[in-house]
Each structure stands twice: as C-alpha cells, then as structure tokens.
Amino acid sequence: NTFRKEFHKYVGGYLDWDSYHPEGVFILTFDVGANGKMENFDIEPKIANSDRLLADIVTAVKKMKKTWTPAKLNGVPVKYTFRLPINFSTEHYTEDL
C-alpha cells in the first residue's frame, strides 16, 4: 500500500544504522486519534538504543504524514491503533516479512 512504500522511503533514508543495529522483525504501533493526529508510538521488541530507534522512526513518520483520516464507527471518527511489522536486516530495512 502507499503508506508502506512511503514509510520504506522515509525510514530507510532517515535511520542511522550505526546507532542501534536493528535486526529481525519489529512491530511499530501508534494510535490515530479521532482528530487524525498520531500519538502513543511504541516499538517491540525492545533493544539497546530502542528509544533512539523509536524517536527516529517517529520523526520520519511525522515528516511523511502529519495527519490521517481517522477510523469511523457508525459514521463517527474514533481512535484506531495502527500496527506495522517492520523487517530489519543488519544493513537495511525491507518490506518482506
């Protein structure tokens, strides 16, 4: 989908691999509020420097898309938790899981 392609472009170019060396599959979660704002970012599993990794991912995500169209329930905007699996290898990010 379009978000995943943009995510790959921004995050792949923004991360400083020497700072945290992510390896394997991680799950990025964040909420999209009823107002379309992103909040409550988290990444699992935790690794050394995962706070820095998460901060850099959040910065990249917010640069690519500041607001989202919120989910709706019975026509009313509601908060939605977005989950994105990310497959990191030693040298690069890939979309393949």
Image: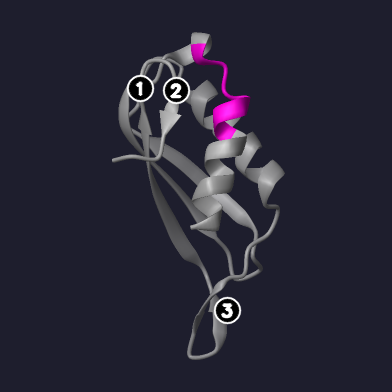
**Of the residues shown, which amino acid type is indicated by label 2?**
His
* Residue 50 placement: quadrant: top left
Q: Distance between the residues labelled 3 and 2?
A: 36 Å
Magenta: predominant secondary structure element? Answer: helix
Q: Name the residue under label 1.
A: 89
Q: Give the range drawn in magenta.
A: 11-17
Q: How far apart are marks 3 and 1 (CA)?
A: 37 Å
Q: Mark 2 points at which residue?
A: 92
Q: Mark 3 points at which residue?
A: 77
**Of the residues shown, which amino acid type is indicated by label 3?**
Pro
Residue 28 in the image: state x and y as whole percent: 42, 42
Would residue 40 appear left or right of 24 to someone viewing this image? Answer: right
| Residue depicted at 61% across the width and 43% down the height | 61
Q: Is residue 12 magenta?
A: yes
Foreground tag (3 vs 1): 1
| Residue depicted at 46% across the width and 14% down the height | 20
Q: Nearer the viewer, residue 13 or 29?
A: 13
| Residue depicted at 49% across the width and 49% down the height | 4
Which mark is on residue 36? none
Mark 1 nearby-residue class (10 Å; few <14, some 14–19, many ≥20): few
